[in-house]
Image (spheres, rainbow, N blue to C red):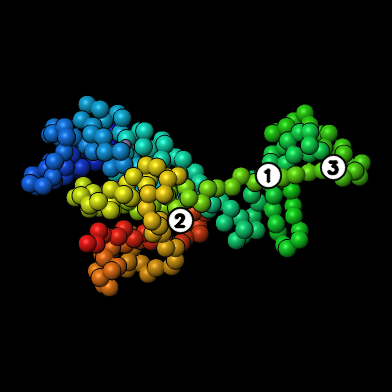
Amino acid sequence: MARNDHKRVNLFNQFASNLDLLKEHPSVTVEPDAANTFLCPLCWKLYSIEAISHLTLEHVPPDYFGGRVRILTCQICNNTSGHLLDSHLARKEELDNALATSSPVEATFTVNKSFKIKGALQVSKPGHVSVYLNKSSNPYRFPELIQLLEQGSTPEVKYHIKGYNKKHVQIALLRIAYLIAVSELGYGFLCNDRIHEVRLQIQHPLQDIMPSSGIIPGNYPDEVLGINYVSYPSEEDAFLVVFDLRSQGVPFDMVYSFQEQTS
Ligand SMILES: [Zn+2]
């Protein structure tokens, strides 16, 4: 058995036992009531051990940010919400790092409204922009552009930098906090209407399900890394999940607060 298969089976068994225990609680009902099943924490579909090939190892935070495997999710949730949301978070990081360190960012250049060449753009100092062109992205037109420049003509060049969707970035962070909480606290964490709202928001990132994303960027002391419960002041009755995002050696902290239901 490959190493990853071992990890998957171990996580499956760990969470399936947790679910079996939770089902013993008189107010908890899981349908269909089959023993030894894994519940995908995002779509709430149940998987038997025979269907383990449909479950994937989740790096939380994503691999790109130096996360580690903490939990399983189903392939559908991993591919849809996972890859889609994480790509926006990664793009935001790339752009933020490029701005902070004056390093190049990928761009597409349209020359004389007639052809495109990929490359990179760098603002090395205010008012000074360097353009790097990727010859292999358009080997037929590249010599033409060089010739134009050598002749001293000024071609009209428009650049396009791929951005990111702010809402997707927020939900990607929310997804990380949610999966850390489920991986640490188990399925019992899900038995709360407000947490159900968080799950639906992650499943439907473009809808406004939660009143706010609850993301609070900042530098938090290492002592609070992980899951915290805030009980004071009482209106702040909430879970706080604090985690590091490390990309290209630039660390920063993120906090998400899951508010408990207050009556
Ligand atoms: Zn799922």
CB atoms of marks 3 and 2 within 8 Å: no
Residue at image x 51%, y 51%?
A: 166
Look at the numbered disc 1 and give the secondary structure of its residue.
strand
* SS assignment at label 2: strand
Residue type at numbered disc 2: Arg
The residue wearing badge 3 is 155
Q: Residues within 10 Å of mark 1 (few under 14, many from 20)?
A: few
Residue 245 in picture, x, y percent from top left: 43, 56
| Residue furthest bottom in the image | 233
Q: Return the residue at label 2.
A: 246
Side of 101 where 158 appears, left or right: right
If the image is split into quadrants, where does the N terminus sit?
A: top left
x, y percentage for residue 138?
73, 32
Q: Which residue is mark 1?
A: 160
Which residue is nearer to you in this view: 118 or 115? 115
The residue sitting at 47% across, 47% down in the picture is: 168
Q: CA distance from mark 3 to mark 2?
A: 40 Å
